[in-house]
Image (cartoon, rainbow, N blue to C red):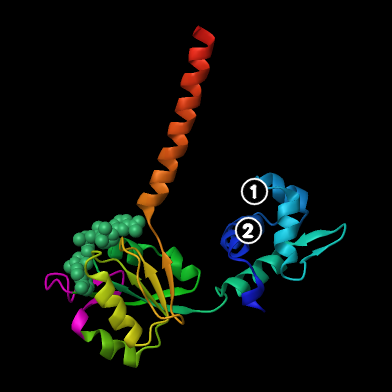
Amino acid sequence: MEHKTISKAVISRLPRYYRYLGELLEDGVERISSNDLSLRMKVTASQIRQDLNNFGGFGQQGYGYNVKYLYTEIAKILGIDRQHNVIIIGAGNLGQAIANYANFEKRGFIIRGMFDVNPQLIGQVVRGVKIMNLNELEGFLKEHDVQIAALTIPKTEAPAVADRLVKAGIKAIWNFAHTDLVVPEDVVVENVHLSESLMRLSYRVCSMQDEEEKEKAKKES
Ligand code: NAI
């Protein structure tokens, strides 16, 4: 599969397709037309056809999409048909919440270890995952084949820890620290910022309220 030819916008929509297709499978649906999928997902059928045509077209004219096949192919494209070993740096509230979320494993993301600098946390076990001293990081990475590191530490600490991770061979960082990391080209960073998402929601709800106020003022005048 040629990953580089697929636009970022399409890739960013694939997890949503994957989720809906998973639900269809659970409901025992074997085939679905782009129109029916469009109604469920509230995106246009033409968008769905365009997106899925990027991969050679999974649909057969007149028959709709084979749900199982499409689900499996999207999993391959997203690389979730294989296992990814993950470590978490920062075993505080957020790090432990991620470790406690069992569903990541179902998607093939296996948490192999957590690291922290707080002596009170080191040695504790969260859902079977041991919290180790950050000093042990490089040694651990030499012995374990880890692909992804989640960074759930303060932003002031994140750049130095990211450097260490890169030097130790980590190629993918799931960054929750509120800072933009500078990494070599062969390292990928996915930033997750819940507060940015919340700000976008705030903008939308405020816009809606403003519109309502305007409508109200119009009616009253
Ligand atoms: P927390 O204070 O509960 O946990 C942070 C942990 O990092 C602590 O256990 C601390 O000992 C550890 N730590 C500090 N320096 C370290 C280092 N150099 N190496 C390893 N561990 C280190 O904080 P919480 O609530 O878990 O948040 C963690 C970070 O994630 C904060 O920077 C926070 O701003 C950020 N955050 C980001 C969110 C997002 O959506 N991106 C949402 C919530 C928090």
In 3D space, how far apart are the residues under numbered discs 2 and 1 (Cα atoms)?
8 Å
Query: Is there CB contact under 8 Å for labels 2 and 1?
Result: yes
Q: Quadrant of residue 99?
A: bottom left
The earlier-in-sequence mark between 2 and 1 is: 2
Q: Which three-letter amino acid code belongs to the residue tagged 2?
A: Tyr
- Specify start and end residues of the magenta stretch as a single range: 117-135
- Is residue 130 visible to us here? no
Give residue 213's position: percent from left, percent from top: 46, 20
**Residue 62 position (above or below residue 43):** below
Give residue 57's position: percent from left, percent from top: 77, 67
Quadrant containing ligand 1? bottom left
Q: Quadrant of residue 110?
A: bottom left
Q: In the rendered view, does 52 fall on the left or right side of 7?
A: right
Determine the secondary structure under disc 2. helix
- Residue with the mark numbered 1: 41
Q: In the rendered view, does 60 fall on the left or right side of 160?
A: right
